[in-house]
Image (tube, rainbow, N blue to C red):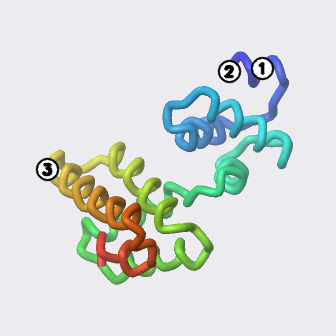
């Protein structure tokens, strides 16, 4: 907040939450994301932050998780395909998915199972199987 006030950066609280999410606990990354968003758009809000940081929108990923929990696997797969078609790499998608799962409100055993499966997919992507089909293994 000190930097935001000192630099007179126009923002909304949701924009700062997006900065925190994209930085994943790294202060330097948060400052870089803040500066890039302010320089690029002149205003810090969720949409601008996720555009600058080129990360999938967490709300979209939350909807995918909700669809899996509700048994709507086709809808979840369609959401995943939509992210892939928007140009996000499987690594970007799975990384955002993991971070959203960590904070998603669900039973602990489900959260651990989701994280385990996400970890398996991430491992396969890191091994070079970086196609949509390896990412689809998660919920489809």
The answer to whether 70 is drawn above or below residue 44 in the figure is below
Query: Image quadrant for the C terminus?
Result: bottom left
Q: Residue at x 61, y 72 (%)?
A: 87
Which mark identifies residue 109?
3
Q: To which quarter of the image does residue 135 belong?
A: bottom left
Which mark identifies residue 36?
none
**Dot 3 alpha-carbon crowd within 10 angstroms: few under 14, some 14 to 19, many 20 or more:** few
**Dot 2 alpha-carbon crowd within 10 angstroms: few under 14, some 14 to 19, many 20 or more:** few
Real-space Cα separation, disc 2 to disc 1, in angstroms = 6 Å
Q: Earlier in the sequence, mark 3 or mark 2?
A: 2
Q: To which quarter of the image does residue 61 belong?
A: bottom left
The answer to whether 114 is drawn above or below residue 78 in the figure is above
Which mark identifies residue 1?
2
Question: Where is residue 48 drawn, in percent x and y?
Answer: 72, 51
| SS type, badge 2 | loop
Q: Are marks 3 and 2 in contact (CB under 8 Å)?
A: no
Question: Where is residue 45 drawn, in percent x and y?
Answer: 70, 45
| SS type, badge 1 | helix
Real-space Cα separation, disc 3 to disc 2, in angstroms = 36 Å
Q: Residue at x 57, y 43 (%)?
A: 22
Q: Residue at x 33, y 45 (%)?
A: 102
Question: Where is residue 74 drawn, in percent x and y?
Answer: 34, 83
Question: Where is residue 42 drawn, in percent x and y?
Answer: 85, 42
Q: Nearer the viewer, residue 123 or 11?
A: 123
Which mark identifies residue 5?
1
Left/right of residue 7 with respect to residue 79 in the rendered view:
right
| SS type, badge 3 | helix
């Amino acid at each position: 907040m000190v930097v935001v006030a000192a630099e007179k950066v126009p923002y909304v609280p949701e924009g700062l939450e997006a900065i925190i999410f994209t930085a994943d606990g790294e202060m330097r990354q948060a400052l870089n994301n803040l500066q890039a968003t302010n320089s690029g758009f002149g205003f810090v809000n969720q949409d601008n932050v996720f555009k600058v940081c080129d990360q999938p929108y967490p709300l979209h990923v939350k909807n995918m998780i909700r669809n899996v929990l509700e048994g709507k696997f086709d809808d979840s797969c369609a959401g995943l395909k939509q992210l892939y078609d928007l140009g996000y790499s499987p690594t970007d998608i799975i990384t955002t998915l993991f971070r959203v799962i960590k904070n998603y409100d669900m039973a602990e055993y489900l959260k651990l199972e989701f994280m385990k499966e996400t970890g398996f997919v991430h491992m396969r992507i890191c091994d070079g199987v970086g196609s949509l089909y390896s990412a689809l293994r998660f919920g489809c």
